[in-house]
Image (spheres, helix red, strand yellow):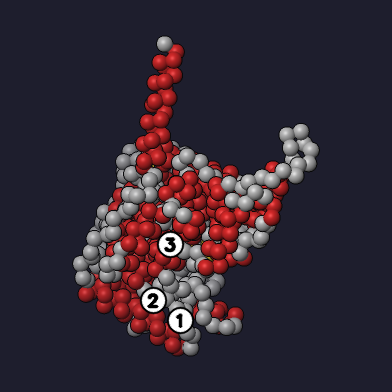
Amino acid sequence: MRIVVVLFAMMITCLVLAVVQFAGRVEQLTEAPADVAVDPQLDAAVQSLNERLHSIWQAAKVPPAVAADELDVLRRLSLALFGTVPSLEDIRAFENDSGPNRIDRWVVKMLQDSRYSDYFSERLARSLVGIEDGPLIIFRRDRLAAWLAVQLHKDASWSDMTKELIAAEGLWTDQPATNFITVARTDDEGLDENKLAGRTVRTFLGQRIDCAQCHDHPFDPAWHQADFEGLAAFFCQAALTPGGVTDGRGDSKRAVYKVITPGTELERTVPAAVPFHSEWLPADGGLRTRLAEWVTHCENRRFERAIANRVWGFMFGKPWHEPVDDLPHPVAGETDILDILGQEFRARGDRLSVLIRMIAQSDAFRRSSKSNVEHEEGYVNQVKVWSVFPLVRLRPEQVIGSLFQAGHIRTIDQNSNPFVRLQKFGNERDFLNEYGDLGEDELLQQVGTIPQALLRMNGRFTGEQSKVDLLSATSQIISFSPDDTAIVDNCFLACLCRHPSQEEQTFFLNQFESARQPDRRKDKAEFPEDVGNAGAASAAKSTDAEQNQTTDGSESTAPVRRTRAEVVEDLVWALFNSPEFSWNH
């Protein structure tokens, strides 16, 4: 009986492993996206955007970098929209797609993928409510992010989402948009009107007025303390009740917002008021509803410029104007890149997908990250005017997302095997706890740290994804690649989304050849500089220990054969730890 049970268990285990392995086979490639209907309006908007970019470059007398390879563009898009490098499966499908407008068709396909809505919703949630869990019980950040994902998947209007966030009523679980309000709860069960006013202007209008809370803004004479107080007064009706967020303190005529003058004990009443264009403010409705209409008014250029700047930052890794929430005031009669993006965004239903498609088709996004000027000053000028793609360090979740995806042949998405998705979730959580998080100021450029570099080099995450085992990408690459040249090519594509140079390919082919020799100590060459020589050092250290020690600890002169699997593991480890892997370029 015991034998039967054991055999049955083994049969089930083999069946599960077979299913999992089948899900990762490389033969079943992603299909190329369908044709996209010709859109003369969008094409004209992209042309206008590119003409403005070229006029900026010409005025600055800065030459543009050459066009980037389309595989580089695919990698940028995948990092921006999914938070990970593309899978080898998708890369091969992309290379096999010879149809017209390849990049735009793939962008449209990506925007229909739930990975886009899930990833973009998380990034938007950071600007809306930060990254902390917030007040216990009455705040559900996960519900807000899930609601944003649903809206993005429907390609809903950003104006409609903004109105809902500012004016929503109800329970924070049933009406997730109310979490934008409940995150500002105070210790006395009230709401912090000042916090809500400051975040509303930063997020939806792209400007910082927090310094005007206690006095006129010291650096921007356009913002006065009265402006901040008038905006904060729009939130004085909102209250937290057992039924959720409600404007139950009374109607707009009876709502009262009071502040204490700094340095005194004097309390004064402040009426709700907007700092400019009061004619945009509706006469009827609750205070938050009226404010939401004013913020999203079709003539409020700050609204469209703010989201255009933020989406530009999501796509490039840095916004057009830094900091992302400190834009200059728009000037009447003058337009810039953000206005060109914003105008088309407004004309097509305030949809983020419009901004993404325009940016992805822009000449700035499709420039190479390699400068074509000789001097450093020339490169700095290219970066200033966006005539070269900026080098930006990957965000923490992009690092682990890319490590995990590169460790699998098939695309990791909602259709993946449940075991793989669970493993991905656990890896991301553990990695971010060790690597650190950028917080809500995610678009501020930050330097990497030594502990982060050590985690990539020596942490279990890199080791697990580079190890050759039954279900790993390295194992499948070895199994399904016809020769060593294909193995090197597939490893480079999976990790760096590019083919190896002739020098790189020759070097690693020599490593495979040395594996066939009886004594691997004869070949201790260094790794090519552009993929990092740490891999060779690590491999050399481990192999020296193996070949020079016997089971009793004594020195051994017996030759040890290096396996092809070891060569592949070292190759992938070196690629994971190369600067090229950890930067967007």
Say what amino acid the circle numbered 2 marks: Asp
Depth check: give the residue in front, 481 or 200: 481
198 left or right of 431 in image: left
Q: Residue 500 at what x, y percent from top left?
A: 50, 64
Q: CA distance from mark 2 to mark 3?
A: 16 Å
Quadrant including the N terminus: top left
Amino acid marked by disc 3? Arg
Where residue 262 sits in the image (x, y, percent)?
55, 60
Give the side of residue 189 with respect to residue 167, left or right.
Answer: right
Residue at 49% from the left image edge and 72% from the top image edge: 369
Callout 1–callout 2 Cβ contact below 8 Å = yes
For the point 44% across and 52% down, the residue is 481
Q: Which residue is mark 2?
A: 363
Q: Circle 3 is placed at which residue position?
A: 75
N-term mark: 3 or 1 = 1
Circles 3 and 1, Cβ within 8 Å, touching? The answer is no
The local secondary structure at tag 2 comes to loop
In the picture, the disc for residue 64 is 1
